[in-house]
Image (cartoon, rainbow, N blue to C red):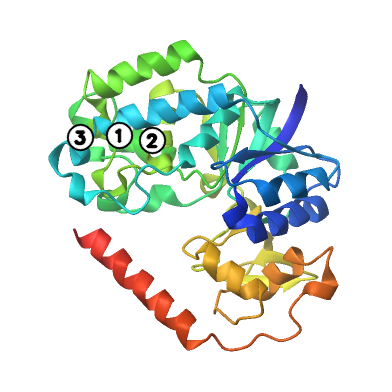
Amino acid sequence: MEFFGVYTLANDIVYDQLVALLNSIEVNVSPDIPICIIPYDERLARIRQEVNSRKNVILFDDWEVIQRWEEFAHQVWAAHPREMQNKTSRPGWYKSHLQRKFVTFEGIFEQFVFYDCDSLAMKPVTDVIEKLKTYDFVFDDWEHIKPRSVAALDISVIQKSGLYTEVDIRPKLHCSSFFGSKRGLFTAKEVEEMKQLLIDQREVEWINGYGWWDDAFLFNYMTLRCDRPLFNFTLSSEYQDRTGNCANADTFINVNNILYDQEGLKPIHRIHYMSYSSRDFANLCQGEDVNIRYQEEFLHYRFLKQPELKPKQLKPPSICSITNKNIQKILGKITVNI
């Protein structure tokens, strides 16, 4: 068993994003760090080919562990008030497999960092490794500043339990797109006890209905309830630690294809292309200008080992592509408003 490694979650649909992430890790983190890909589902033909072409990349294959975490999440969400009240209000990601990232806690690395596949690594993770000497969970995001209405946890409901105040809860709110942690933090016994609290004691109501079925919201409950030490770089007392990370929200400066936070040119752990679809990236890699922020940086890493395949010039999107994108936006709005 390796002491430290990297996890991500992928299938063939996000192949372009996976290749870009793997290349960015090799260049900006370490060419030798072991990487384990958790299968999002069984569409893995291209993923397997990519794994076979890289010396330090493997595919997680313990399907018993995967299924155990799937069942845990499904049982919890089945007990959520949103499921109980109105099944037509299910969000677009209903019954996704994002909770499979929790297999990291029963995985092959003693300590690890997880990157969402729609990310590019921008610097080594030595600071994460250092923090894991003191903390059990390490994050780097700004979820803790979100308004109550869209926070991962329902702060009002939790406060009524008398167990936590908003002051306790706020600094522990986080996303699940990037985190460092350790194997064995959630034992089978502890997960079973947590499930009883969630379902039998109705603590599932602690999870905000806004993000019902969101793996990050369930993760927030888990890290709060287990009461283990947690660190978030955005709450660090060190100025250099506090950076942005979102492609669609933050401003970065490119220096030799490495992005830095515009404010003070601070190094960032990763850029996260949240809110952009896998179809956007597929079209981009085929030469279409899909208006993704920092798309040139993405193309650099995607075709780092295949420069001859990189689009020489981006062309405007076709009418068909624009129409499909608009339809997806409309469907998304309908889903949110149901």
Residue 211 visible in rendering? yes
Q: Position of residue 33 (x, y in %)?
A: 80, 40
Tell us which disc is closer to us: 1 or 2: 1
User: How far apart are the alpha carbons under marks 1 and 2?
Assistant: 9 Å
Give the residue number, with chain letter if any, for mark 2.
Answer: 218
User: How far apart are the alpha carbons under marks 2 and 3?
Assistant: 15 Å
Mark 1 vs 2: CB contact within 8 A: yes
Q: Residue at left 75%, top 56%?
A: 24
Residue type at mark 2 is Leu
Mark 1 crowd level (few <14, some 14–19, many ≥20, 10 Å Cα): many
The circle on residue 157 is 3
Which comes sooner in the sequence, label 1 or label 2? 1
Quarter occupied by residue 37: top right
Q: Position of residue 64 (x, y in %)?
A: 55, 22
Give the residue number, with chain letter if any, for mark 1.
Answer: 77
User: How far apart are the alpha carbons under marks 3 and 1?
Assistant: 17 Å
Residue type at mark 1 is Trp
Mark 3 crowd level (few <14, some 14–19, many ≥20, 10 Å Cα): some
